[in-house]
Image (tube, rainbow, N blue to C red):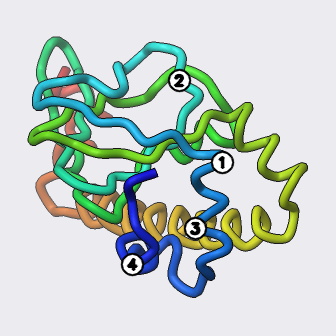
């Protein structure tokens, strides 16, 4: 793996891990490079991989009625596909490389092997991953509640309830 311990240890997900853990990444994670405009994940397609962005930028978007709605942009140190480690299935969004992107990837199957062969390290990693996912969920939940509680949204919902809007 060309990714160094210094690069990995700066990433929030790996803070506090030792060089021993980072050397294990080489055994379980695959390093990949993608050119711009490459789709790493396609909404609706079966997905079972977790991606850690080492370098570059990706855009996460959802397609509704052939409209592309940008959900987020992620760069070095951030990750996506975390649900796939625990529950592989259909992707709920698409992810496309905006710039050349370097990733570390692990499939659900390789992650399970990691858990079985390195349970203590896997537990620490999983805990940090879960902590980050919960923070993301809370932030998304707050943003959604803020949007739903806007006076315009409330008025529109009331009009729909009264049958005045379709």
Tell which circle, 3 or 1, labels the residue nearer the N-terminal end: 3
Residue farthest along the bottom direction in this orientation = 16
Looking at this view, is 58 or 99 the one in front? 99
Tell which circle, 4 or 1, labels the residue nearer the N-terminal end: 4
Q: Residues within 10 Å of mark 1 (few under 14, many from 20)?
A: few
The quadrant of the image that shows the C terminus is top left
Looking at this view, is 19 or 156 the one in front? 19
Is residue 161 toward the left or the right of residue 50 in the image?
Answer: left
Residue at 40% x, 73% y is 11
Tell which circle, 1 or 2, labels the residue nearer the N-terminal end: 1
Residue corresponding to mark 3: 22
**Distance from Cα at disc 4 to Cα at disc 3:** 10 Å
Tell which circle, 3 or 2, labels the residue nearer the N-terminal end: 3
Marker disc for residue 47: 2
Residue corresponding to mark 1: 27
Q: Secondary structure at mark 2?
A: strand
Tell which circle, 4 or 2, labels the residue nearer the N-terminal end: 4
Residue farthest along the front direction in this orientation = 2
Residue corresponding to mark 4: 6
Looking at this view, is 166 or 70 the one in front? 70
Is residue 61 toward the left or the right of residue 86 in the image?
Answer: left
**Distance from Cα at disc 1 to Cα at disc 2:** 21 Å
**Distance from Cα at disc 4 to Cα at disc 2:** 30 Å
Taking 91 as reference, is 2 above or below it?
below
Q: Secondary structure at mark 3?
A: helix
């Amino acid at each position: 793996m060309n990714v160094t311990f210094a690069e990995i240890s700066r990433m929030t997900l790996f803070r506090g891990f030792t060089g021993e853990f980072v050397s294990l990444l080489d055994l379980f994670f695959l390093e990949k490079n993608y050119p711009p405009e490459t789709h790493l994940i396609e909404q609706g397609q079966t997905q079972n991989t977790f991606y850690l962005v080492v370098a570059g930028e990706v855009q996460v978007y959802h397609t509704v009625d052939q409209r592309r709605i940008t959900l987020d942009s992620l760069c070095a140190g951030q990750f996506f596909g975390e649900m796939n480690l625990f529950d592989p299935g259909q992707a709920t969004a698409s992810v496309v490389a905006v710039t050349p992107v370097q990733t570390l990837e692990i499939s659900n199957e390789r992650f399970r092997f990691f858990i079985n062969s390195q349970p203590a390290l896997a537990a620490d990693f999983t805990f940090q991953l879960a902590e980050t996912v919960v923070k993301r969920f809370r932030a998304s939940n707050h943003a959604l509640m803020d949007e739903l509680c806007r006076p315009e949204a409330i008025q529109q919902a009331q009009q729909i309830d009264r049958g005045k809007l379709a």
